[in-house]
Image: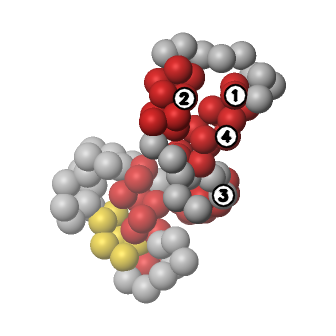
Amino acid sequence: MITINAALKRMYPDAPEGSWEISGYSYEGLAWRYDGVEKPTEDAVNAEIQQIQNDWEVSSEYSSRVSNYPSIEDQLDMLWHSMDNDTFPKSEPFYSTIKNIKDSYSKPE
């Protein structure tokens, strides 16, 4: 659950300690003590809570995408094999460097 406190911290990142106090989990329990700054409306706080939730969902979705990529080693190996099979243009010195290593050291079976 995203709290009112989390929303306020994101809305007012430079607020001094003690600028608000929350009793319970509802907006009604918000005691505003931030001098010179108007207390945000309940709608504004709820909108920020929703934005945090949306950001978290996008971040989680992206993390899932990232975690499904093959390792960098596997990606580079795929790229090299595409070049070696002439299905992708050979990029130098990448191709010749890897080819020399592959020719010099056999892969264990």
Q: Amino acid at mark 3?
A: Asn
Mark toward the start of the polypeptide (3 vs 1): 3
Mark toward the start of the polypeptide (3 vs 2): 3
Query: Based on the displayed image, in which of its 4 quarters is residue 56 positioned?
Result: bottom right
Distance CA(mark 1)–CA(mark 2): 8 Å
Q: Amino acid at mark 4?
A: Met
Q: Amino acid at mark 1?
A: Asp
Q: Position of residue 45 (x, y in %)?
A: 53, 59
State the count of labels: 4
**Residue bearing the label numbered 2:** 99
Q: Position of residue 107 (x, y in %)?
A: 53, 51
Disc 1, SS: helix
Distance CA(mark 3)–CA(mark 2): 28 Å
Residue 36 visible in the displayed image:
yes
Residue 41 visible in the displayed image:
no
**Residue bearing the label numbered 3:** 68
From this view, report whether residue 89 is shown above or below residue 107: above
| Residue at position x 47%, y 72% in the image | 3
Whether label 1 touches label 2, CB < 8 Å: yes
Mark toward the start of the polypeptide (3 vs 4): 3
Within-10-Å neighbours for mark 1: few <14, some 14–19, many 20+:
some
**Residue bearing the label numbered 4:** 78
